[in-house]
Image: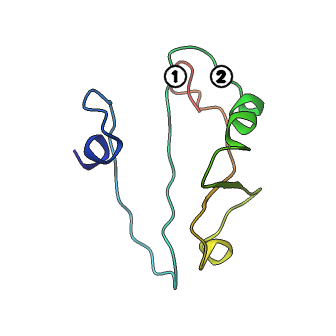
Amino acid sequence: NESRKILEIPELKVSGTCVRVPVFSGHSLQINARFARPIGVERAYELLKDAEGVELSEIPTPLQAAGKDASFVGRIRVDETVEHGL
């Protein structure tokens, strides 16, 4: 699994799907994450706001990220389909 190799976490439980859409620049990801203990949306934003290489945006778009190295993160919300999920 490519994610396990890149992150160097062989025990990482991940299931990825790639959906390609025609945009002029960039890639977009939608990620669901399950945590060992509860984490709220506000706490997630708090943890990410000072993370290196992360830029928070209300609604990130490929155009907004064009020509920049940062990963734009936004629209974080609770995933009610899994325990402790965002």
Residue reaching furthest top?
37
SS at circle 1? loop
Q: Residues within 10 Å of mark 2 (few under 14, many from 20)?
A: some
Residue wearing tag 2 = 39
**Would residue 33 appear left or right of 3 to someone viewing this image?**
right
Q: Which mark is residue 85?
A: none
Per the image, label 2 sits on a secondary structure element best described as loop
CA distance for labels 1 and 2:
7 Å
With respect to residue 27, does 81 lie above or below? above
Q: Quadrant of the C terminus?
A: top right
Quadrant in which residue 18 is drawn: bottom left
Task: Identify residue type, mark 2.
Answer: Ile
In the image, taking residue 32 as reference, residue 18 lies left or right, namely left
Image x and y of residue 53, in percent: 60, 55
Colour scheme shown: rainbow
Q: Quadrant of residue 7?
A: top left
Q: Residue at x 25, y 49 (%)?
A: 2
Residue 76 lies left or right of residue 10; in this view the side is right
Q: Residue at x 52, y 81 (%)?
A: 25
Which of 7/84 is in front?
7
Q: In the image as oriented, which residue stretches furthest toward the left?
A: 1
Rendering coords of residue 32 (x, y %): 50, 39
Q: Position of residue 1 (x, y in %)?
A: 22, 44
Q: What's the residue type where badge 1 is placed?
A: Phe
Question: Between 74 and 66, which is closer to the camera in this rendering?
Answer: 66
Q: Residues within 10 Å of mark 1 (few under 14, many from 20)?
A: few
Furthest residue to the bottom? 24
The reply to whether dot 1 and dot 2 touch (C-beta < 8 Å) is yes
On the image, numbered disc 1 is attached to which residue? 35
